[in-house]
Amino acid sequence: MVKTVQSNFFTMDIARKADGGLTIIELGDGQVSGLPQRADKTDFYGEIKKVMVDVC
């Protein structure tokens, strides 16, 4: 899939599914990567950490 992206600079968010496969969550222009300024980074990454601890 990555080889078909017609850009030299992009971001791709992927996640591992319960069956072990991968899925693309988002594909976008690399210049706009990151969280919105209004986002609470502590809460955001805290929630990801909770999910990852449960999965791993």
Image: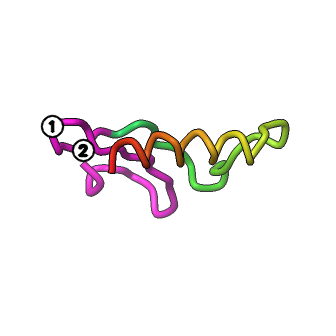
Figure quadrant of residue 24: top left
Instruction: Using the image, tell me which numbered label, if any, was put on residue 4.
Output: none
Give the foreground label among 1 and 2.
1
* Colouring scheme, one of rainbow, by chain, secondary structure, one colour: rainbow
Q: Is residue 11 magenta?
A: yes
Q: Secondary structure at mark 2?
A: strand
Q: Secondary structure at mark 1?
A: loop
Q: Which residues are magenta?
A: 1-23
Q: Amino acid at mark 2?
A: Leu
Q: Amino acid at mark 1?
A: Asp
Instruction: Using the image, tell me which numbered label, if any, was put on residue 19.
Output: 1
Instruction: Using the image, tell me which numbered label, if any, was put on residue 22.
Output: 2
Q: Is residue 4 magenta?
A: yes
Mark 2 packing: few (<14 Cα in 10 Å), some, or many (20+)?
few
* Residue drawn at 74 percent across, 46 percent down: 41
Side (left or right) of 35 relative to 18: right
Towards the viewer: 32 or 48: 48
* Residue drawn at 15 percent across, 37 percent down: 19
| Place of residue 50 in the rendered image (x, y in percent of width and height, measured from the top left) | 52, 42
Mark 1 packing: few (<14 Cα in 10 Å), some, or many (20+)?
few
Side (left or right) of 15 relative to 47: left
Figure quadrant of residue 46: top right
Figure quadrant of residue 7: bottom left
* Residue drawn at 43 percent across, 48 percent down: 53
